[in-house]
């Protein structure tokens, strides 16, 4: 039986590089507020097509490793790295079982990824591979209020996330994983009041586009409208 196309499959088929909330503008704003130093060991978890990875290296010249679990995403991320002369490592890996030794990285950068994992397992791994006083910057789907079980299942059915959490619930998970400090930032903490963000995904129509993929895109637009006052995100700055 043919496997059902998932939301992550949709992103891969469409070649979407900045699918996370806030897009490239938010990535740039985060690096301004929380700069990465040259040579700093950084793990980009869930790198997708590698657009942020390329920007991270270009902007900071950090010692970068980029990982993703989706084979099509990794294929695109490796191709992007080759275009830049392969200055950083790209590899297929699972956030829940990172193939790195303890204390390997100073920073973890993650854009709308951890919600798609088994959260406690992933956070345990993040903690393990971070050096003392290491930190995480993670953009994560976050609800503005507690929602009903039916609403949770509605969101999970499209996006395939493991849980749908409030900011408080996210913080609780980080603290349970032994992190010492967790701060959840809102979009407005990174931008002036007169700045507006473009939330449109930069679509690239590939040859394997099919009806099921189109239906996922339509469903996504419907969900964004249905939960526009409830479903949001936070930028979590977390210290080991």
Image (tube, rainbow, N blue to C red):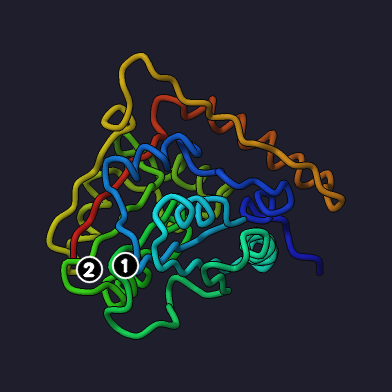
Check disc 2: other Cα within 10 Å, few if <14, some if 14-19, many if 20+: many
Residue named by callout 2: 177
Vertical order, 53 against 66 (above or below): above
Measure the C-alpha gap from mark 2 to mark 1.
6 Å
Q: Position of residue 206 (x, y in %)?
A: 81, 48
Q: Position of residue 163 (x, y in %)?
A: 41, 54
Figure quadrant of the N terminus: bottom right
Vertical order, 132 against 198 (above or below): below
User: Going by the picture, which residue comes out furthest to the top?
Assistant: 194
Check disc 1: other Cα within 10 Å, few if <14, some if 14-19, many if 20+: many
Tell me the residue at 32%/78% (across/down).
104
Residue closest to the eye, 90 or 219: 90
Tell me the residue at 45%/58% (across/down).
162
Residue named by callout 1: 123
At mark 2, the secondary structure is loop
Vertical order, 112 against 189 (above or below): below
Which of disc 1 and disc 2 is earlier in sequence? 1
Figure quadrant of the C terminus: bottom left
Residue closest to the eye, 231 or 56: 56
Q: Position of residue 238 (x, y in %)?
A: 22, 56
Q: Quadrant of residue 96?
A: bottom left
Dots 2 and 1: beta carbons under 8 Å?
yes
Left or right, 223 with respect to 146, comes to right
Left or right, 21 with respect to 129, comes to right
At mark 1, the secondary structure is helix
The disc label shown at residue 161, or none: none
Q: Quadrant of residue 75?
A: bottom right
User: Going by the picture, which residue comes out furthest to the right?
Assistant: 207
Q: Position of residue 28 (x, y in %)?
A: 41, 40
Left or right, 77 with respect to 39, comes to right
């Amino acid at each position: 039986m043919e496997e059902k196309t998932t939301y992550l499959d949709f992103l891969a088929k469409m070649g979407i590089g900045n699918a996370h909330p806030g897009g490239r503008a938010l990535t740039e704003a985060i690096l301004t507020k929380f700069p990465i130093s040259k040579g700093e060991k950084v793990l980009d978890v869930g790198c997708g097509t590698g657009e942020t990875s390329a920007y991270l290296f270009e902007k900071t010249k950090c010692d970068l490793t980029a990982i993703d679990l989706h084979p099509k995403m990794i294929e695109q991320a490796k191709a992007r790295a080759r275009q830049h002369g392969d200055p950083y490592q790209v590899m297929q890996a699972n956030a829940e079982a990172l193939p790195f030794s303890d204390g390997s990285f100073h920073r973890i950068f993650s854009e709308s990824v951890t919600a798609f994992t088994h959260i406690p397992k992933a956070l345990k791994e993040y903690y393990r591979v971070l050096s003392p006083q290491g930190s995480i910057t993670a953009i994560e789907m976050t609800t503005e209020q507690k929602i009903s079980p039916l609403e949770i299942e509605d969101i999970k059915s499209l996006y395939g996330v493991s849980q749908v959490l409030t900011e408080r619930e996210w913080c609780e998970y980080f603290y349970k994983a032994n992190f010492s400090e967790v701060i959840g930032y809102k979009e407005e903490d990174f931008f002036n009041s007169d700045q507006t963000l473009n939330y449109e995904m930069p679509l690239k129509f590939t040859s394997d586009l099919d009806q099921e993929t189109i239906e996922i895109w339509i469903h996504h637009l419907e969900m964004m409208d249905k939960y526009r006052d409830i479903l949001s995100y936070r930028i979590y700055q977390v210290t080991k």
